[in-house]
Amino acid sequence: MAHQSEIPLNRIFLWSCPRSLSTAFEKCVTHMEGAMVWHEPYTSIYFNRVFQNPETFVKFPRMKAFVSQFQKAVKMFDSVKDQYEGGNLERAENFTYEYIKEQLEKPLDEGEKFLLIKDMAFGIDGNYGLLPKGPFRHTFLIRHPNRTSLSGRKLLANIYDYEGDLDKFVEMQKGHPFMSWDMLSVDPLFNLYKYVKENIDPNPVVIDADDLQNHPDKILKKYCESVGIPWDDKYLTWNASDEFLKYMHGAVEQIIWGKNQGVYERAFESTQFFPSDGKPPIEIPEVCRMYADEFREGYKVMYENRLKPE
């Protein structure tokens, strides 16, 4: 019997952690022929669970700002839903592990050739048994921890409406539901990677964000070839419009929130991958170090096993 890595697949997970260029990668894929794309269904499930848990606001009182932003997105839905008419986005309240499992196991939509589910590993953390059954390929996008921590700090400050000196933004040290190990295991991405290696595929595909930015022609082609997507050089550039959004599957509130808060702004407006700004920073502010260190061991292991541009 052929091992999964030898079986042609058309259902692919791309797992990542926040601030790793995964949404730009996702937009790139939406422009590939025959692509059917799900945007972070497990992250939406996680949001539902966090918002419905009163302990969240005891541990993280400033999370109320985040919730108000989501509530604003929900209210805006009625005024902007015409923009998504004929699309695939739906209300986040529908999302449960059981519902998403059922949706991902369904036959692909007519005319679609492959399915890509882009998500954050923390969304499925500790619930691997609820993943969909069948021949799914699990792939991983990593980014240097110093880069993700700096970008994560900027995002978290935005979520908390913080306008002071970022080097004094102590919430990076105090924790957050997406950066706090009393609600998540340490490094959910690396834990999922190890689970996949031990239980599903001993050689899962890994790509690095810096490689993707600096060598998109090589990394994108290698990735597509590895997961069975026919490659075409035209996939190196794509349309700047965000019209693609409504044709993705996912939670409409999350998309609206991301647009409102600028979380996805650069990714939604992207047209290609541009070179990174030099090597990852060696030194980062004290407030970012603990978060970066949590991901460092896993990053090193996965980096050694990544698809290389050479």
Image: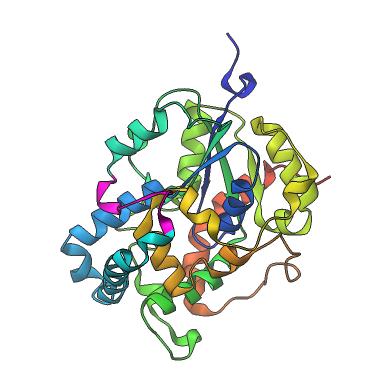
Foreground of the two, 48 or 179: 48
- Percent from the top left, x then y, of residue 170? 40, 80
Q: What's the image's color scheme?
A: rainbow
Q: Is residue 301 visible?
A: no
- Give left or right: position of 168 versus 215: left
Q: Which residues are magenta?
A: 84-95
Q: Is residue 175 left or right of residue 200?
A: left
As drawn, the residue found furthest toward the right would be 310
Task: Give how far across and how far down residue 251 sits, in percent.
Answer: 36, 53
- The foreground one among 216 and 310 is 216
Q: Residue furthest left?
A: 54
Residue 93 in sight in this render: yes
In this rendering, would 211 be left or right of 206?
right
Q: Is residue 234 above or below residue 149?
A: above
Residue drawn at x 19%, y 58% as measured from the top left? 52
Quadrant in which the C terminus is drawn: top right
- Which residue occupies 29% across, 46% down? 95
Q: Nearer the viewer, residue 116 or 135?
A: 116
Q: Quadrant of the N terminus?
A: top right
Q: Residue furthest bottom?
A: 164
